[in-house]
Amino acid sequence: MSSLKKEENKLPEEVLERLHWYAEQHSISQDKAVEQYLGYIEEHLGIVNTHEEDDDFLVDAAETFVVERRVMSTPGGSSTELVGCFVAVEPKIRDKRENVREYAIQSAKEDLGAAIEKGTVARAFVENGIWMLEKAMGIVASTQERFDEDNDPWFLVRDSGMTLAILQENPDWARHGEPISPYLFSRTYRFYGNTPEKFEDDLQLFRIDVSGSTELSVSQNVVFGESCTVKVRPQGDNVSPGWEDMWRGVSNFFKSINYNKEFVSEDDREYLKGDLLMGGMDCYVSDLSDLMDVYRSESETVEGFDNPIGPLVCIKGKVTDINQTGYESEYDPAGVNYTMRVSSFALQREFPDNMWRQEVSVRVHGFLGQDCHAFDYKGRKGWKPYAVKSTVYIFGRLGLRAVEEGKQEVPTIRALGVYAPPRLAIPAGEGGNTSLDQFKGVE
């Protein structure tokens, strides 16, 4: 039995009755209606396990889901499938609700009554063990959220002794006037591919914006260079210039990832190897000795930045050094960066007398190094660390760094994705005692 069917069997009959009506109204299957309902209550109400909730609350949530103020075809729009492979993940996590949250809190500090009357916030309080909301015009609404001394409900914001809920102020949204999550985190993943019908003729590099209520929910491991299908949604009608390549990940985005090769014919599956995909990108630089020329010709000057912004590139190199100890970085969300160096025959032949140009230094951000197997390859027995002289494909931002006390500038790469082809990986030595305690004296 599928997980969706199991979840459906746990839903109260009154919920299924509403979802059946919703399915008929929108010409979709009841399974699809259940899937949309579960995604809706997780995104907007923070409900992950329906069996932990009261039937009355689930019925009320279903009522909210099906009764749309301004009817949309489906909640959040229809999804699209992309096929290809992941090549990168950005280090930065954005909080999309930061400005909304700060404005709401400041409004409440200045005049709580006016902020409630305007519909910016609701005052949250507990009555008979249930969280209640005081909204405009003195309306008090139950949230069905039980008071828990150790855990605040998903919508609650505490500040300066106030307990608040931030409300949806856009009248065009179905949940206008209802609480929204005070935090909405976002992380960008880069994906090389296209829709199934365009995959063989038009491979492109896309950004996928994954949003969630916690930093962990947008920071899940993906496998670089391995073919897969993902589900995304378009941005909408008003796309800002420079953001045409952006898609939005669906709810439960990481659960939608399916690593497979079935989207091409069996005869063509040999072309889905990670090294062939990444080596076929438009930004692939086959000769490492060309990196300086690439930087000079493709860097852009951006207002507000002192130095030019280097282009995104993909390179292939032999690992000459790995430092997995890492060093502290106040600019990295994970608080740490890692380093490695790569080289090639062409690079060493081009610069036989310049040690600084014989290798390319690579900086690996914390999430990539700690969670996304930047220093491992995926073999038949799972993930294993690779050693020096292994071949790696690195996708990242090309830049320059000063060496020899500023006398010389050499290319460097800020890695956003690292892929080690298993057939070209040299296994690192494993085993032994790695604890520092072994160096302590006997007591």
Image: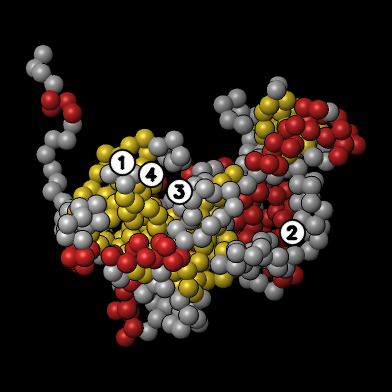
Disc 1 crowd rating (10 Å Cα; few below 14, some 14-19, many 20+) is: few
Q: Which residue is drawn at 52% across and 51% down?
A: 187
Q: In which quarter of the image is the C terminus?
A: top left
Ranked by sequence position, the earlier of labels 4 and 1 is 4
Real-space Cα separation, disc 4 to disc 2, in angstroms: 42 Å
**Looking at the image, residue 409 lies above or below residue 230:** above
Ranked by sequence position, the earlier of labels 3 and 2 is 2
Q: Which residue is drawn at 28% across and 44% down?
A: 404
Q: Are marks 4 and 3 in contact (CB under 8 Å)?
A: yes
Q: Do the residues labelled 3 and 2 touch (CB within 8 Å)?
A: no
Q: Which mark is residue 405?
A: 1
- In the drawing, does residue 293 fall left or right of residue 421? right
The residue at which mark 3 appears reads as 91
Disc 2 crowd rating (10 Å Cα; few below 14, some 14-19, many 20+) is: some
The residue at which mark 2 appears reads as 66
Ranked by sequence position, the earlier of labels 1 and 2 is 2
Q: Is residue 70 visible?
A: yes
Real-space Cα separation, disc 1 to disc 3, in angstroms: 29 Å
Camera-nearest label, 4 or 2: 4
Q: Which of 195 and 243 is in front in this view?
A: 243
Disc 3 crowd rating (10 Å Cα; few below 14, some 14-19, many 20+) is: many
Q: Are marks 1 and 3 in contact (CB under 8 Å)?
A: no
Real-space Cα separation, disc 4 to disc 3, in angstroms: 7 Å
Residue type, mark 4 in image: Gly
The residue at which mark 4 appears reads as 366
**Residue 45 location (% of width, % of height):** 65, 46
Q: Is residue 379 visible?
A: no
Q: Which residue lies furthest to the front in this view?
A: 407
Residue type, mark 1 in image: Glu
Q: Are marks 1 and 2 in contact (CB under 8 Å)?
A: no
